[in-house]
Image (cartoon, helix red, strand yellow):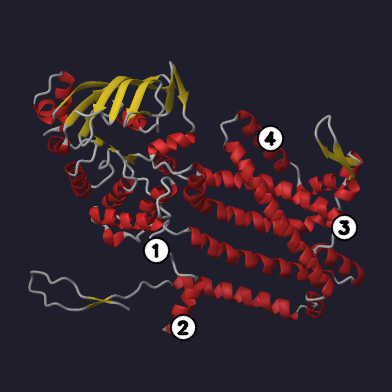
């Protein structure tokens, strides 16, 4: 509770200290109680319903084949994200270009790859060998090297290709949105100061665009993490495929789906933490003072 | 007088159907302060922005320090300069914006040091030392590590002026430097401008501050509808205007 001393008035009132009584919020308490009861019921159900079969869950959670599959999921996510964003940068630059050919090509790419469902696209890439049984690199009408498509595009390669191409279309739009969000005055100020073009882009525009890019990019990344489960259609041993193999044998569907679910949740949590601190880094100067991190808040509470 | 720092001849500029500049000629000599007055839409800002090629003129020539801005002349042909060359020209011309346009993610000091380091490739230690001197000169030595959003409008504009000065330009252009400020903060920015004028900085200032024009200007230009209506020393243009249009404008601005 805080204590205020009112300004001394000219009237005869003696100066006295006034006590502030905080407003009461009874409905807030009622709501909190209701939520806690519902939460307790849910936890009770998780603990007591034999259908969850926690023994099987813990038996498989760190099982070797599951952890290996998790590694494949991570590989697909990381490689897909890197390739996707590397593809997104030129797509965004092309769409913002004054050259009509570049901007139209970028627009068309984004249109097509946003339109085709990921699963359809993955099946296309997996069947590339049916369309072209040999792929060739070389100079048009000149010498070239040719490869058997099946050798070049493995199922994993097809999955990665599909994810990256799909991701690039969305990443391109996210990056473009970020670049557009930077005020025109910033471009003008940088130009008026004679700052070289690449420096204007990387030192002035990109750090400001990151504020708008990051939340959307994190969304895309989480989405990609989950989309890797779709590549099970290509019989790649990622997390979701592996738990299906296991429950296909043992018939314990629910605990094994929980194994996959909990791993996805843990990975998303890790990404969210990464997102929080990256966003905070790029918030420098955007807000007058940064709010404390949850960790700092906790420390402040413990110190009291 | 010596060769003029700024020499504008027959400049025209249109935005679509709007003919904003209709044949402007302008000369500004070294160490002088030129104040451009005029109603909104008279082309003042466009003229100022064309001096450092933020606007490309449709017709006419702009010379700063004897160099043609934005073009290279060969015989009777004008070759457009590359962006790199234009950026190099701009580094010699300071520009102060109405809305400051400081880089929000950089501290006041970093705002000042960015261009001398990246555009002029000066040594870092030297640039930082000079930047602190400049912040001190505009009265903000204690705000070097503050971000622009932690500063008042007047303080931000003073940082922007230090940022322009850091390039040691031969000319500084001010585009309504006090128009976005609270009346109380206008004074602190005008004080800096007066100091610069007294120190012999070549300046062209678009403003509505008649008092500043009277005190600090060597040459006052009144523009209307894309043309210079009249110009001369402040005593002449402000106190004894020859044109009805100037008189009508001043009667509204001066109370």
2 and 1 marks in contact (CB < 8 Å): no
Q: Nearer the viewer, residue A247 or A96?
A: A96
Q: Label 4 belongs to which residue?
A: A108
Q: Label 1 belongs to which residue?
A: A289
Q: Chain of mark 1?
A: A
Q: CA distance from mark 2 to mark 3?
A: 50 Å
* Secondary element at tag 1: loop
Q: Earlier in the sequence, mark 1 or mark 3?
A: 3
**Mark nearer the viewer, 4 or 2:** 4
Relative image position of residue B130 (x, y in whole percent): 31, 54
Q: Label 3 belongs to which residue?
A: A235
Figure check: A65 above or below B223:
below
Q: How many marks?
A: 4
Q: Earlier in the sequence, mark 4 or mark 1?
A: 4
Q: Earlier in the sequence, mark 4 or mark 3?
A: 4
Q: Chain of mark 2?
A: A
Q: Which mark is residue B213?
A: none
Q: CA distance from mark 4 to mark 3?
A: 31 Å
Give left or right: position of B71 versus A274. left
- What residue is rendered at 11% in x and 70% in y? A9
Q: Residues within 10 Å of mark 4 (few under 14, many from 20)?
A: some
- What residue is rendered at 37% in x and 33% in y? B52
Q: Label 2 belongs to which residue?
A: A302
Q: Chain of mark 3?
A: A
């Amino acid at each position: 509770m805080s204590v205020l001393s009112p300004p001394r008035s000219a009237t005869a009132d003696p100066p006295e200290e006034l006590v502030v009584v905080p407003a009461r919020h009874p409905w807030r308490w009622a709501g909190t109680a209701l939520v806690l009861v519902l939460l307790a019921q849910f936890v009770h159900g998780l603990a007591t319903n034999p259908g969850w079969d926690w023994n099987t869950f813990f038996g498989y959670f760190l099982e070797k084949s599951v952890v290996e599959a998790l590694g494949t999921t991570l590989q697909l996510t990381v490689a897909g994200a890197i390739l996707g964003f590397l593809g997104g940068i030129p797509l965004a630059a092309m769409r913002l270009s004054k050259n009509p050919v570049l901007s139209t090509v970028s627009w068309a790419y984004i249109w097509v790859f946003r339109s085709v469902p990921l699963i359809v696209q993955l099946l296309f890439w997996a069947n590339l060998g049916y369309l072209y049984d040999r792929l060739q690199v070389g100079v048009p009408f000149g010498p070239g090297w040719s490869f058997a498509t099946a050798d070049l595009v493995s199922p994993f390669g097809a999955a990665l290709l599909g994810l990256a191409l799909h991701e690039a279309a969305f990443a391109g739009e996210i990056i473009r949105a970020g670049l557009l969000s930077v005020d025109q005055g910033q471009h003008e100020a940088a130009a008026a100061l004679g700052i070289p073009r690449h420096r204007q882009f990387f030192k002035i525009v990109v750090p400001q665009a990151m504020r708008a890019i990051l939340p959307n990019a994190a969304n895309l990344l989480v989405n990609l993490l989950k989309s890797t489960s779709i590549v099970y259609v290509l019989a790649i041993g990622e997390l979701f495929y592996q738990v299906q193999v296991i429950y296909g044998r043992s018939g314990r569907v629910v605990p094994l789906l929980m194994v996959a679910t909990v791993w996805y949740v843990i990975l998303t949590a890790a990404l969210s933490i990464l997102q929080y601190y990256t966003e905070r880094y790029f918030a420098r100067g955007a807000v007058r003072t940064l709010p404390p991190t949850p960790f700092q808040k906790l420390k402040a509470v413990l110190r009291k | 007088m010596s060769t003029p720092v700024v020499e504008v001849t027959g400049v025209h500029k249109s935005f679509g159907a709007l003919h904003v500049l209709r044949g402007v000629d302008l000369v500004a000599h070294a160490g002088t302060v030129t104040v451009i007055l005029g109603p909104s839409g008279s082309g003042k800002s466009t003229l100022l922005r064309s001096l450092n090629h933020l606007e490309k003129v449709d017709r006419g020539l702009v010379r700063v320090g004897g160099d043609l801005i934005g073009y290279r002349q060969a015989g009777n042909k004008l070759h457009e300069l590359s962006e790199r060359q234009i950026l190099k020209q701009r580094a010699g011309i300071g520009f102060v914006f109405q809305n400051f346009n400081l880089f929000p993610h950089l501290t006041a000091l970093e705002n000042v040091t960015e261009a001398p380091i990246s555009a002029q490739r000066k040594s870092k230690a030297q640039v930082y030392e000079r930047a602190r001197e400049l912040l001190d000169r505009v009265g903000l030595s204690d705000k070097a590590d503050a971000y622009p959003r932690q500063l008042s409008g007047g303080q931000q504009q003073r940082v922007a002026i230090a940022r322009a000065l850091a390039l040691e330009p031969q000319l500084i252009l001010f585009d309504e430097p006090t128009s976005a400020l609270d009346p109380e903060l206008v004074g602190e920015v005008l004080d800096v401008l007066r100091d610069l004028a007294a120190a012999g900085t070549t300046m062209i200032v678009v403003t509505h501050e008649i008092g500043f024009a009277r005190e600090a200007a060597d040459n006052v230009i009144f523009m209307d509808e894309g043309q210079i209506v009249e110009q001369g020393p402040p005593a002449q243009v402000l106190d004894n205007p020859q044109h009805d249009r100037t008189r009508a404008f001043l009667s509204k601005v001066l109370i």
